[in-house]
Amino acid sequence: MNFSKFLSRAATGTILPLLLLGAWHYAASRPGTLVPTVSDVCRIILQPAAKPESIDTPCLGFSALVSLTRVGLGYLLAVTLAVPLGLLIGRNAAARAAVSPLVTMLRVVCPIAWLPLAILLLGVGNLAETIWGIPAAYRHKLLFEIQPAMVFIICWGAFFPILLATASSAHAVRKSLLENAWLLGAGSWSLFRHVVLPHSLPSIVSGMRIGLGISWMVIVAAELYPGTRSGLGYTIWVSQDTVQYQYTFAAVFYIMAIGLIINGLLWFLEKRLGHWQAEVV
Amino acid sequence: MPNEPDLAITFHEVAKSFTNRDGQKCQALKNFTVSAESGRVTCLLGPTGCGKTTALRILAGLEKCDSGYFSVNATRNADRSPALAYVSQQHTLLPWLRLEDNVAFPLRLRGVSKKERRRAAGAFLDKVGLAGKERLFPHECSGGMRQRAMLARLLATGAGLWLLDEPFANLDEKTRFVLEDTLLALIRENNISALFVTHGIEEAVYLADRIVIMSPSPGHVVANVEVPLPRQRDRLSSEFSALMETIRENLDSAILAG
């Protein structure tokens, strides 16, 4: 019974995507249109390692890898900075008073708006050349596609959701739990380790999920900027310029698929870590 | 009573006030002088707002008194005395830990090995009637089971003095009766001194060796009543009802006078 319920719900959920696909097919079949056919796009999607015929970009698989690496580096940096800072301002009133106004000011600006500033500070060069000084003769392909300025704004985009989720949950620990753990003999480190941290963990992961979503959106826009030679966003811009929309559609599909997978993994982790929150609901 | 040599807890002319959001001062305790003998159950009985909870929180070190002093096992104004353990109305089990890990939490803080913790937690849970429930999380338990687990954690602290702040107030009557008997058995077996806060007259008469009747605004002691009834007490006996009636009159007149 449960399974049939699941099936009928899944079937209901596929109606709108199928309608959209139909509309696309209709649009592509009209004479003189630039809209690529469904089958063209599918063919390109299924060949991630094939060098595009009509545009000058790396294969889609490599583009995805480049985008993922940029996002991964910036995102890891964001997590590394935002989680400890969030815990600090969640638990410490002085730190909160000092940091909150600046955070509020900075976070309302779209991450992309900081890209010119990032380029000004960090240049358009790539990680391998500008930071590590590896001569181009020894070029390792991937490292030469990673620009610090992009990593910076990815980090920027993910930083604030993680910071806010961490800080608010660290702030919201039930007072009686802290008092009781203190009475049982816990010192400040134990209170943090055994009460504040486990309490905040599900919210931290939830913030990480939101932050990653933003990073993944920011990268597409960031790859429009100078110094880029690859990436899914770059593929989108180049294919648009050269009117090769089948690659635009294929790149969008890759962005969607990768985003869904990452989101799903973090969602799963969030549910695993937060199973005890059933009490609150 | 004041000549009793072995006092676990004493309050001497303790005063405590709070300032509320509107800046008004609220006197929670005034001239509060109470003692509790070792190895006995002393109940603080009074209506809401008479400072019962404040008194326990002062003992536990969660509040500071404005004037006067208290002592725990003859140590004055002890800050977080390891001889004390505290249970509140709302359970304070850590929601992300299984019952066995919750019960063993005090041991973990003391650096006891995992294997030893598991063994001890199992034994304590067994004592409170939760054998086989070690792996459950608090949200999977009924209110009664959670308070049982709280009692098991009390045992794990190894403290000889239990502060119990309306621990059974959220439970249905039948569950409460069973837990009251569990509590009394644990107290007897482990030679515990207990200070039990309640607003229930019947609960006080059933549990206490001595009842301290309190009255609100500001919280102070109205009367001390010894409970001479033998254990196991019968809630339906005429002596039980007579004592309840005496205490009710005491409470009523105190409230009218206040």
Image (spheres, grey):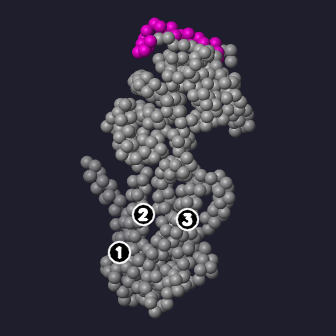
Q: What's under tag 2, amino acid-wise?
A: Asn
Percent across and percent down for residue A262 are 41, 66
Q: Which residue is mark 2?
A: A263
- Check disc 3 and report its element: helix, strand or loop: helix
Q: Residue at x 47, y 44 (%)?
A: B110
Q: CA distance from mark 3 to mark 1?
A: 46 Å
Range covered by the magenta-colored residues: B230-255
Q: Position of residue A270 (x, y in %)?
A: 43, 56
Q: Position of residue B140 (x, y in %)?
A: 38, 40
Please indicate, yes or no, whether residue B146 appears anywhere in the rendered image: no
Of the numbered discs 2 and 1, the one sitting upstream in the chain is 1
Which residue is under mark 1? A25
Callout 1 secondary element: helix
The C terminus of chain B appears in which quarter of the rendering?
top right
Secondary structure, mark 2, is helix
| Mark 2 residue crowding within 10 angstroms, few (<14) / some (14–19) / many (20+) | some
Q: Is residue A160 above or below residue B151?
A: below
Looking at the figure, which quarter contains the N terminus of chain B? top right
Which residue is the site of mark 3?
Answer: A81
